[in-house]
């Protein structure tokens, strides 16, 4: 198993951060797989997979490059640098573009566990990798980034609250399958059989949520390490662009109708605040009204309290015509 030795001071200083590059790379992995983990991903793939495949068909190097870079259990280092705190997509991808040609080929041999195909014995691999990543960002991620950012911020808020409630062990155990806090400064980051890594005192440890159901670990030398993980839950498709029927607005109010539409998937109050932009007090009051009306119910998940639509809430949405707008979850 992949094991990191982390001293308590490094763990205490670790941070949750958002990375548009990590979100883009996770989306590239989803496009490469071609199969979603839930209906929302399938809907996104139906929209963007044809364009992605056309992009690969127009560049005979791109397909072999992606297959080699993703490897079986190791991602080519140059293709997926570890984002810095506050770094834009353009800043991170610039490091892909400026990687050395020899380093890129060496990284690909590691991820392939063998020699390169003839198509990849060339010097422009970093530029081609950067161009493909930029395509994925511009065409398939950036149009949704504002919405996705709010979803990711909700995850960070929920995880941060959980650190305060149950400590880091509870959070690390729940990041993604294969992560587990083993005690005695040992953090299992995945199930792969790699030698343990000791994270030096003073190193930066970052946790980066992404919306696709995927994850990986990466590092830059000995100074920065990152764990990329899928955000909490499967949140509904772009609510910022989904109309709520006027009849439902009139019946329960615009804010409550919006919350009811969101709660096809269980969400905490903290998540709803981040996703909707409403204040904590307002969200709490609206949830209380919806709950008293029997339209939502509370569920406990560990130390968290989650809200979800009831059967009555589903019937109300369908009767108002909202069902046609709800679409698949993402």
Image (cartoon, rainbow, N blue to C red):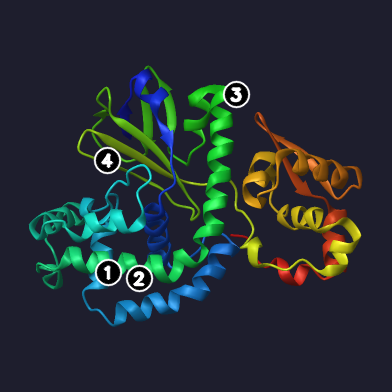
Cα distance between the residues tagged 3 and 2: 41 Å
Q: Mark 3 or mark 1, which is nearer the start of the sequence?
A: 1
Say the numbered circle drawn on residue 131.
1
Say the numbered circle drawn on residue 219.
4
Mark 4 crowd level (few <14, some 14–19, many ≥20, 10 Å Cα): some
Residues marked 1 and 2 touching at CB (< 8 Å): yes
Q: To which quarter of the image does residue 123 belong?
A: bottom left
Q: Mark 4 or mark 3, which is nearer the start of the sequence?
A: 3
Residue at 29% over, 54% down:
91
The answer to whether 18 appears left or right of 200 in the picture is right
Say the numbered circle drawn on residue 176.
none
Cα distance between the residues tagged 3 and 4: 28 Å
Q: Residue furthest top?
A: 184
Q: Position of residue 179 (x, y in %)?
A: 43, 35
Say the numbered circle drawn on residue 135.
2
The answer to whether 200 appears left or right of 280 in the picture is left
Vertical arrangement, residue 87 with respect to residue 258, above or below: above
Vertical arrangement, residue 65 with respect to residue 222, above or below: below
Q: Position of residue 71 (x, y in %)?
A: 27, 56
Residue labelled with disc 3: 165
Cα distance between the residues tagged 1 and 4: 22 Å
Q: Mark 4 or mark 2, which is nearer the start of the sequence?
A: 2
Cα distance between the residues tagged 1 and 3: 43 Å
Q: Mark 2 or mark 3, which is nearer the start of the sequence?
A: 2
């Amino acid at each position: 198993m992949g094991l990191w030795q982390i001293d308590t001071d490094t763990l205490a200083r670790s941070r949750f951060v958002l990375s548009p590059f990590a979100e883009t790379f996770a989306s590239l992995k989803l496009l490469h797989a071609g199969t979603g983990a839930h209906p929302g991903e399938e809907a996104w793939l139906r929209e963007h997979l044809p364009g992605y495949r056309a992009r690969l068909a127009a560049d005979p190097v791109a397909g072999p490059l992606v297959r080699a870079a993703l490897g079986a259990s190791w991602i080519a280092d140059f293709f997926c640098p570890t984002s810095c705190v506050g770094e834009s997509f353009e800043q991170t991808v610039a490091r892909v573009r400026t990687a050395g040609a020899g380093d890129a080929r060496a990284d690909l041999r590691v991820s392939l566990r063998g020699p390169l195909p003839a198509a990849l014995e060339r010097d422009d691999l970093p530029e081609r990798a950067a161009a493909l990543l930029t395509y994925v960002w511009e065409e398939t991620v950036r149009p949704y980034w504002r919405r996705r950012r709010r979803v990711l911020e909700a995850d960070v808020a929920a995880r941060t609250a959980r650190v305060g409630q149950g400590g880091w062990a509870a959070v690390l155990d729940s990041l993604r399958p294969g992560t587990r806090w083993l005690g005695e400064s040992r953090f299992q980051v995945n199930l792969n059989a790699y030698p343990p890594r000791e994270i030096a005192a003073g190193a930066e440890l970052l946790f980066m949520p992404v919306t696709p159901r995927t994850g990986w670990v990466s590092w830059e030398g000995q100074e920065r390490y990152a764990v990329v993980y899928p955000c909490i839950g499967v949140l509904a498709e772009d609510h910022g662009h989904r109309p709520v029927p006027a009849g439902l607005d009139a019946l329960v109010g615009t804010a409550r109708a919006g919350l009811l539409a969101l709660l096809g998937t269980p969400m905490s109050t903290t998540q709803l605040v981040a996703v909707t932009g409403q204040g904590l007090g307002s969200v709490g009051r609206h949830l209380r009204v919806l709950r008293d009306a029997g339209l939502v119910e509370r569920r406990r998940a560990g130390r968290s309290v989650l809200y979800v639509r009831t059967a009555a809430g589903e019937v109300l949405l369908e009767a108002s015509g909202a069902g046609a707008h709800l679409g698949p979850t993402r």
